[in-house]
Image (spheres, grey):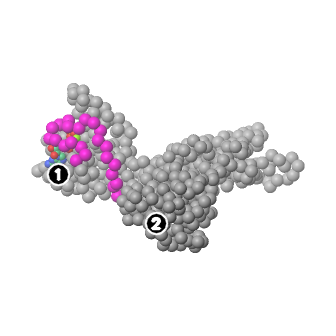
Amino acid sequence: MTIFQRILNIPLSSSIFYRFNSNSTIFALSSGLGKCGVAVVRVSGTNANYAITQMTNLKNLPEPRKAVLQNIKHPLTKEIIDKGLVLWFPGPRSFSGEDSCEFHVHGGIAVVEGILNALNSLPNFKLADPGEFTKRAFLNGKLDLTEVEGLADLLQAETEAQRKQAFLQSTGSLSKSYKKWKDLLKQSLANIEADIDFAETETLDYGLLEKVEQNIKNLCKELENHLNDGCKGELLRNGVKTVILGEPNAGKSSLLNLLCHRPASIVTPISGTTRDVIEVTLNIGGYPLVLADTAGLNINSQDVIEIEGMNRARDLYRKADLIILVVNIQSYSSVQERYVSFNDYLKNYISDLGLSDMNFRKNCIIILNKIDLDTRNLSANICDKNVVKLSCKSEEGIIDLIDILTKHLKVLCGEPTQEHPSMNQLRHRQELEKCYHNLQRFLKESERKESPDTVIMAEYIRKALRNLGKLIGEVTSEEILDIIFKDFCIGK
Ligand SMILES: Nc1nc2c(ncn2[C@@H]2O[C@H](COP(=O)(O)OP(=O)(O)OP(=O)(O)O)[C@@H](O)[C@H]2O)c(=O)[nH]1
Ligand SMILES: [Mg+2]
């Protein structure tokens, strides 16, 4: 039993370290399937060396991590399948921590099939499950669970900012904070346990418990800051949900099509064309945007289909992280004399759409569309940095729109750095919230007027430690692992 397990009070049976005992050697195509220049087949496990000695003419294993060019043959028929590079990675200095090797061959389908068949004929070799190389790396202590999740996100990342966040996480930026907090809690627990065991017989450092209390208070502050980050990391990971709203015919669908460079949404001069929600995922300035076109809001409509479309639009509005409100300059022009300013018109417009109760100025971009039809040059008098003057027809103003969108996305998603990584998964948030509550209970007990019970205090720290242990995967269950590794592809 390790010291860590003793401190956390983990029964042996629930420790993943004791359950991992794999004898099989796994293999898989790690590069993409299909015709390509080079394909990489990866092998990991106790017998990985066999793959080299049985499938090449090498008498001895090559120098570790140095590529050697070899004829690669089937171990039984001895037929040469291809000529390619062979690399040897003896454990534990390999990705999985086990003995591993790689074959870099021509990326033809038959070549890859030939190599996989050859490996399959070796004793105790089996095709890897999705994520099995990474799972072995985790079980061998090469990566912790947050790093594994970062790696999964790195494979899924579609934008530059997502890649940055995932890369930082996969290289331990999040776990560094969590491990620092864990060390502090371990130290605190040791101090409290010392107080419990020796307080009556020996003189302990005066004020030790007060010091622990102060440390826990500071940690709670750090946790609060980490938890109250406006879900920046989650927004970056999942995409910023953005809804386009406005009156019928304002040009909402034209805007969506302009931003995604394809006719995803139907555009016609008929008012009320869009009914269903049309959603596209975009990369704007390196940030992920999940953009939804909606039915035009017309509170006077009696049409049941249009009414259902508007309900869907309002529903999205309530859940959106960012709102794009489209105003048709022709509509403004026709009533402009009635208003003292464009802002005044806007207030009325929002109220007419049935959205008056919402705070529009927060995370909202206003688009004054169809400026190519601005014959009275009304837009010249509108100087609000949150109002973008646009023509979906001539594309005038599109650069300003992309600019302002990127600014909003930057604020919403933040810019994760090595020093300030963002938490980006519900699993982390839930575990950290539990940790925070356990520490609050600790503080409540320690602040009790009558003598606080140090045994209870120690128990709360133990629980908080267990929460952090779960977060980085030192304590985990097959169920959690299955959920995390299911996102991986075969060969990773
Ligand atoms: N001249 C001009 N016409 C535009 C512009 N943007 C959109 N239109 C036209 O306005 C009409 C309505 O455009 P849509 O994009 O379908 O408008 P919508 O807001 O989606 O309308 P609904 O789906 O009915 O709510 C179409 O005929 C478009 O070609 C623009 O910037 N300039
Ligand atoms: Mg439309």
Left or right for 85, reference 393:
right
Q: Would the CB of label 1 be found within 8 Å of ligand 1? A: yes
**Up/down of 42 relative to 296, above or below:** below
Q: Quadrant of ligand 1?
A: top left
Q: Using the rendered image of the protein, determine whether residue 140 is visible from the camera's viewpoint.
A: yes
In space, the residues marked 2 and 1 are separated at their CA atoms by 61 Å
Q: Tell me which residue sits at (66%, 47%) in the image.
A: 19
What x and y, as percent, mark residue 309?
A: 27, 33
What x and y, as percent, mark residue 427?
A: 54, 44
Q: Which residues are magenta?
A: 263-286
2 part of magenta stretch: no
389, 175: nearer the viewer: 175
Q: Secondary structure at mark 1?
A: loop
First along the sequence among labels 2 and 1: 2
Q: Of all residues shown, which one is farthest toward the left?
A: 375
Q: Would the CB of label 2 be found within 8 Å of ligand 2? A: no
Q: Tell me which residue sits at (67%, 54%) in the image.
A: 184
Left or right for 224, reference 208:
left
What x and y, as percent, mark residue 286?
A: 37, 58
Q: Say which amino acid is labelled 2.
A: Ile
Label placed on residue 80: 2
Label 2 packing within 10 angstroms: few (<14), some (14-19), many (20+):
some
Q: Tell me which residue sits at (53%, 70%) in the image.
A: 57
Q: Quadrant of residue 100?
A: bottom right
Q: Tell me which residue sits at (44%, 50%) in the image.
A: 237
Q: Say which amino acid is labelled 1.
A: Lys
Label 1 packing within 10 angstroms: few (<14), some (14-19), many (20+):
some
Label placed on residue 393: 1
Q: Quadrant of residue 97?
A: bottom right
What x and y, as percent, mark residue 140?
A: 62, 56
Give the mark toward the camera: 2 or 1: 2
Q: State whether the magenta stretch is mostly helix, strand or loop.
A: loop
